[in-house]
Amino acid sequence: MSTEPQGAEGGSDAADAERLAAEWAAMAAAGTGGGEGEGGAAAGEEGFAAAGEGGEGYGAGAPEPTRVLNQAEIDSLMGFEGGENGAQDVSGIDRLVSAGLVSYERLPMLEVVFDRLVRILSTSLRNLTSDNVEVSLDNIASLRFGDYLNSIPLPAMLAVFRAEEWDNHGLLMVDSAMIYSIVDVLLGGRRGTAPMRVDGRPYTTIERNLVQRLVEQVLSDLSAAFAPLCPARFTFDRLEVNPRFAAVSRDSNACIVVKLRIEMDDRGGRLDLLIPYATLEPVRELLLQQFMGEKFGRDSIWENHLAEELWQTEVALEAVLDEQAMRLGDVMAFEPGRQLVLNIGRDAPVRLRCGGIDLFLGRVGRRQGRVAVRVDKVLKQYGG
């Protein structure tokens, strides 16, 4: 009777082993793909054999095998397309790191300023050219300064300007089409004819002076656009043709680039306004506002009430006749009846002090039987 259970048990074990082997082979074939064929089945048999030696079979809770991605698959996930024959110049990690260098916070109020600039510039250019001028805002983007310099279509003129209140610089790019258009309009060119472009020669003095006149008008309108937000005066510094001579920031520094399109009937061109983030740093808190005059949750009623009540506050005012420097031992030796001689005359002025700060100079006298001090001078500087 002892042999029958053993045979039955051995038969059930063999059936379970065959069933688990078939399941594992199917799982291995599904994980590695149908093209692997015999290799997948062999891997399944080896895995089952290893599990059999450990005493445990592969059940529902067994971990599935992991697959490691190669560099080409990683670059594909990062959005990088390799060159011919699989050649890759930049890895996906390098692209991810370089993209993070221009990830800066959004400045909502700056968009309002540039929208205001478009409206003001449209009116001022109509008055300057006596023509129908349309100014449109194409794009506002954050770029690294070096990337922008390398993307400038040459020939072009680059005007360096200075923000006086912020003590920093910016850049204004006028492309070749806009240069010839403004020269043609200001010198009386007829409508309906495209401006003549002569490439391969340097810009003349007349062309540079006319472009400088356009740049000064744009900077004046930019100052007017910033006026409701904060006082800002932008002044023209110099005009360059070589982009490397117009460097106002490091190549890796981030900048705001505003692309403006100017159309004058069938003529026109593009203006690019570049302002580094370092230039906008003094007014960054103002540019972070969602709307003009935002208080960021402060209660203006309480602020006004506090300011009014401060005028009713009582403070202690001290009249200082004289000050002397003495050793601590002499001070500790003072006894009742000791007299201190003050180095001050009868009509010498005394200082009125509050909280350790000298506020007024006056003279000691009497008024209605009380000692009084008449204020003769207001000290404009503390301690003066």
Image (cartoon, rainbow, N blue to C red):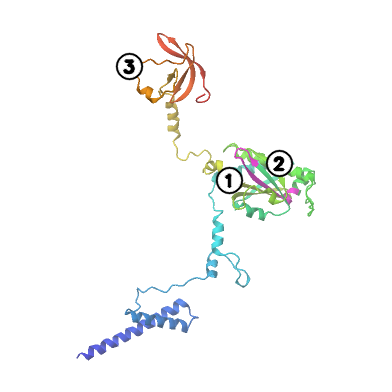
115 relative to 95, above or below: above
- At 66% across and 46% down in the image, what residue appears? 171
The residue labelled by disc 1 is 278
Q: Position of residue 377 (x, y in %)?
A: 52, 18
Secondary structure at numbered mark 1: helix
The residue labelled by disc 2 is 126
- Answer yes or no: do the residues labelled 2 and 3 have beta carbons within 8 Å? no
Q: Which of 327 and 236 is in front in this view?
A: 327
Per the model, the C-alpha gap separating discs 3 and 1 is: 66 Å
Mark toward the start of the polypeptide (3 vs 1): 1
* Mark number, residue 336: 3
Residue 25 visible (yes or no) = no
257 relative to 315, above or below: below
Secondary structure at numbered mark 2: helix
For badge 2, the amino acid type reads: Arg
For badge 1, the amino acid type reads: Ala
Tell me which segment is drawn in magenta: 162-179
Per the model, the C-alpha gap separating discs 2 and 3 is: 89 Å
For badge 3, the amino acid type reads: Pro
Determine the image quadrant of residue 328: top left
Mark toward the start of the polypeptide (1 vs 2): 2
Q: Which of 147 and 176 is in front in this view?
A: 147
Per the model, the C-alpha gap separating discs 1 and 2 is: 33 Å
Q: Position of residue 166 (x, y in %)?
A: 59, 40
